[in-house]
Amino acid sequence: MKKNILYLLTIIFSILSLNMGTMGEKEKFIVPEVKSNFVTTIIDQNDNSIELDKFSIDGKVFIHGKLGLAEICVDLNKASNINFIKKDNDLFANLTLKDGKILEIIVDKKITCFGKSSFGDVRIYFDNIKSISFKPKTN
């Protein structure tokens, strides 16, 4: 009798323990609040296009990288688009500025971009992006 009760309790405990994990669910992420005056279109490495508002790079409205031996931060309000190119183990961001100048900087592949789309919140890593374009926001 005691054996049956122990066996039954073990089965019940095992079943209840299964519900304690996330069971493969993804966690909810929060899009950082930023003041931006542009709408962003991201094209990922699979050529999917997403239009985003409240776009940020790690919660900021600038891109950070290395230009030669220097570290630089470029305000996204100065950019018209960014194209990402993988070379060896590095990820290069070719920034086209509104004045027509082009900067090629090395960026961290794991930097996260956030934004809000018409269908929901979006999070994507630099490593998965082909290009980002910026256009002025119209109210």
Image (cartoon, rainbow, N blue to C red):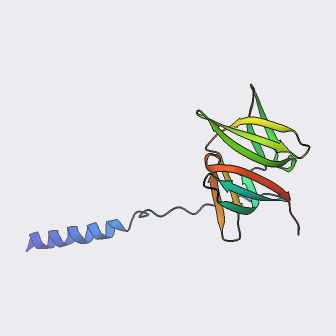
Tell me which residue sits at (67%, 49%) in the image. Answer: 130
Determine the image quadrant of residue 42.
Answer: bottom right
Residue 82 against residue 90 in the figure, above or below: below
Position in image of residue 107 (x %, y %): 68, 38
Tell me which residue sits at (58%, 34%) in the image. Answer: 89
Residue 52 against residue 12 in the figure, above or below: above
Position in image of residue 26 (x %, y %): 51, 62
| Residue that lies at the very extreme toward the right in this rendered image | 99
Residue 58 in view of the camera: no
Q: Quadrant of the C terminus?
A: bottom right
Q: 111 or 90: nearer the eye? A: 90
Residue 136 against residue 74 in the figure, above or below: below
Tell me which residue sits at (63%, 57%) in the image. Answer: 123
Q: 7 or 37: nearer the eye? A: 37
Q: Quadrant of the N terminus?
A: bottom left
| Residue that lies at the very extreme toward the front in this rendered image | 47
Tell me which residue sits at (66%, 69%) in the image. Answer: 120
Position in image of residue 97 (x %, y %): 86, 44
Position in image of residue 105 (x %, y %): 74, 35
Residue 92 in view of the camera: yes
Determine the image quadrant of residue 14.
Answer: bottom left
